[in-house]
Image (cartoon, rainbow, N blue to C red):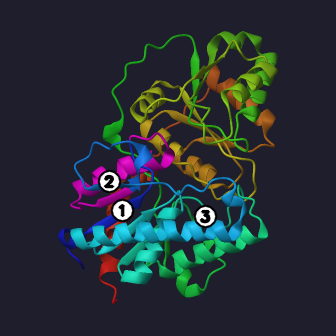
Amino acid sequence: MTDINKIKPLCLSFRTPPAVRPQSILIGKMIPEWINQGLKPVIMTYQDNGKWQIDLPIYQIEKLGINRYFNKIPFLKNFLEKKYYEKLFSLAKGIINKHQINIVYSFSNPYASNILGAMIKEKLGIKFISNFSDPWYDSPYQSFSPAEAKRVLNQERCIIRNSDRVVFNNDVAKKLVMKKYPIEWQDKALVIPHCYDRKDYPEVVRVRGNEFIFSHIGVFYPQRNPQFLLEAFKKLLEQKPELSEKTKINFIGGAGNYTGYKIEDIKKLVADYNLAGVVEILPIVDYQESLRFMKLADCLIVIDADMVGSPFFPSKVVDYAGSGSLILGITPTNSPTAEFLKNLGFQSFNYQQLDELVNYLKNLVTGEVRLIINNEFLNQFDVKNTTAKLIRQFQEVLDLPR
């Protein structure tokens, strides 16, 4: 098997620290552990992420920018996109030659990273591993025109055809994406889950007061918002008004410019459910501060969209688990999040279980719930273990014949 010291990876991750996005937070945990385990990657990323203070070669690139008028003209849009990727490929080719790169790892979103990785494999023959953090063509969130759907499918097919391995973060997403491809392509797919890093969490001392603190950390989306949660709390406090003095709900960083869900949307929901007295809306915080809030919470809330067969597994829930705090999920039955929480020893509720959720919230606030986390299960999500699994894939791919 290829020696680790002989692995020279180019990591195409177009979201990196210090940007506060799920993608950049994930790569901010992964790359330091790559270094700890003997890899010295070269990184290509968008320049608008800011400067990452890490001792590695980082090459910053511009995002593809097509104005809204050109974007409406398909042949012109395709021409400008083609020129953009040719420019990226030319830059990547120079980086590969300079650093003697022998494997490319592309980490989406955005999918531009996977497209570039496939171009490199196709044109230069460099071994290539793609990572689909979320489904693309098959995403339930996407609504493509027929022409756009055909274009995206062709691009996705090119990526998977050229990949030596295709990485997903959960088995539902892997099956959803890969089922439409030949068996020999399906055999290249595997699951490496999201990760947490124990040493990232700060030491906190919480002075326990009278309040039971529920915290949701991270942005909401139109399809994934706190309405059902607030409906449950409204019903609970109507049934047990005395619990209002013992209940506090924090929404931390719920409004993001890129999600289409604004702080006004959150405030309106809180007002509609008459919960202003128990809800506090806080701004987006950096990753380290988010970990502090996780440690301070009595219960952390994860919310998935209400869709049957959901293929989404938010990286945030793994960070939640690493904090050691109790976690409550609002997620479809048998979703990746629901299965994760069940295996940890925690509870989740679907959108048809309002009364069950209300009763569980009551038991939480009154101290009737005592749960113990399954650390043996959690350990497989430690960044040391997920990184070791990925490095084994690098070694296996490099041992494949060209």
Which residue has dot 1 on it?
Answer: 11
From this view, report whether residue 337 is shown above or below residue 165. above
The disc, 1 or 2, on the residue closer to the chain's N-terminal end is 1
List the single residue furthest toward the bottom.
401
Q: Residue at x 46, y 31 (%)?
A: 290
Instruction: Check residue 31 in the rendering and tell me which mark sits there, or answer none.
Output: 2
Q: Residue at x 36, y 58 (%)?
A: 44
| Amino acid beneath label 2 | Ile
Which residue has dot 3 on it?
Answer: 173
Q: Residues within 10 Å of mark 2 (few under 14, many from 20)?
A: many
Instruction: Check residue 214 in the rendering and tell me which mark sits there, or answer none.
Output: none
The residues tagged by marks 3 and 2 sit, at their Cα atoms, a distance apart of 24 Å
Local SS, label 2:
helix
Q: In the rendered structure, are the residues bearing label 1 and label 2 in contact, judged by CB atoms less than 8 Å apart? A: yes
Identify the image quadrant of the C terminus.
bottom left
Based on the displayed image, in which of its 4 quarters is residue 292 positioned? top left
